Amino acid sequence: MVDDERSQIPDVLRELVAPLLSAIASGRIVDHQRPATLLQELQRDSARAAEAVMARPEAMDTMLAFIGEIDFAEVRRGLDEATRAAKRGAAADQRYSLLLNLVRGADAACPHIAVVAFARILQPEFYRRFCEPVDLLLTAEASKGEVRARALMRAAREIGEWLYEPYLRLLWELSEFGRGKRAKWPPFGQLVNQCVERFAELPRLVEPQAALLRNAGAHATWVYVAAEKSIIMWDEGKTPTRVTLATLQDTVMAMWQVAGPTLWHVASLHVVRDLVIGKGLMDLFEQVAKVLLSRQPADRTAALELLEEWRKQLTAPLEQFFGKCL
């Protein structure tokens, strides 16, 4: 690589990552009250930066030069650290090992199929779902009495709809994949009951009162009992249930934890450790990058053939599995 190409790389990188660095420096990246706005701003600013960079006549040469400067050993060390970080985050919740067991069961039935289930989790939209109830959880933690009860019941509704139902669908899908079946999901209340029954031997993986909490929070079928620091909640035609605020807070927080942070860490751990590293995606990228640097049409064709071969190895078992499940 020539010196003028090398000298342009730092400027190009700064321009491309500037929107993300700005969000981190300003604290917007952890602003749980404006997640949708943050995602839209990052998407807009990143697109503008990329468009400005790629509009330059020398852009392609500079980007190819950057690929040539990549220290793949350092990248692998970074991936190893990302794996350790995801595992540390997941291990904060003892239920993570139960989730990983479901992942292993699904992948044993069909290699790589857990990635299909996790594809819905590792999306920018999940960040918004994760953030949605946080202000209510913080209010509950800082409050007492009826104020705490109201915050918790509102949080229970949002967690149930935004996080817990997708979480249960993922559990059911992984379990069905492990049985060689394609998942079909019943309505939320039935899904809770069926998951409670199926995962009865996996402690605390499913909250039995999740549907009751969601419904009571959504339909105002609950009342605060000041003298007992508890609430009474009910579904139509069913016996009311009484819980203390302390128990309610523990339950709602446990639902948010497993369906939000823990699930995100488990999905990240699986994709990085088992797909990017374990299935050779990083090795493939290094091979393709080296071929691209030749700038010869035939070599670039060879790079595309490498990518296609890897895609076939990854997707062939999936195509066979879903073909049988139709």
Image: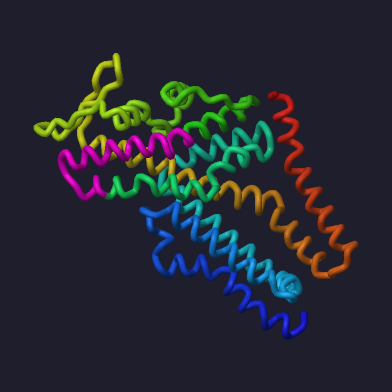
Colouring used for the render: rainbow
In the image, residue 247 sits, relative to residue 71, either above or below, namely above
Residue 195 seen by the camera: yes
Figure label count:
0
- Residue depicted at x 49% and y 60%: 41
Q: Nearer the viewer, residue 98 or 167?
A: 167
310 is within the stretch colored magenta: no
Of all residues shown, which one is farthest toward the bottom?
A: 3
Quarter of the view holding residue 215: top left
Q: Which of 21 and 85 is in front in this view?
A: 21
Is 72 on the left-hand or right-hand side of 230?
A: right
- Residue depicted at x 82% and y 65%: 291
- Residue depicted at x 67% and y 83%: 7
163 is within the stretch colored magenta: yes
Is 271 on the left-hand or right-hand side of 316?
A: left
Query: Residue 122's spot in the image, x, y percent?
Result: 55, 47
In the image, residue 95 sits, relative to residue 50, either above or below, namely above
Quarter of the view holding residue 207: top left
Magenta-drawn stretch, dominant element (helix, strand or loop): helix
Quadrant of the drawing holding the C terminus? top right
Q: What stretch is highlighted in magenta?
A: 139-167
- Residue depicted at x 50% and y 53%: 86
Query: Residue 201's spot in the image, x, y percent?
Result: 45, 27
Q: Nearer the viewer, residue 176 or 65?
A: 65
Query: Residue 233's spot in the image, x, y percent?
Result: 25, 26
Is 151 on the left-hand or right-hand side of 105?
A: left
Of all residues shown, which one is farthest toward the top?
A: 237
Residue 69 seen by the camera: no
Query: Residue 38's spot in the image, x, y percent?
Result: 45, 58
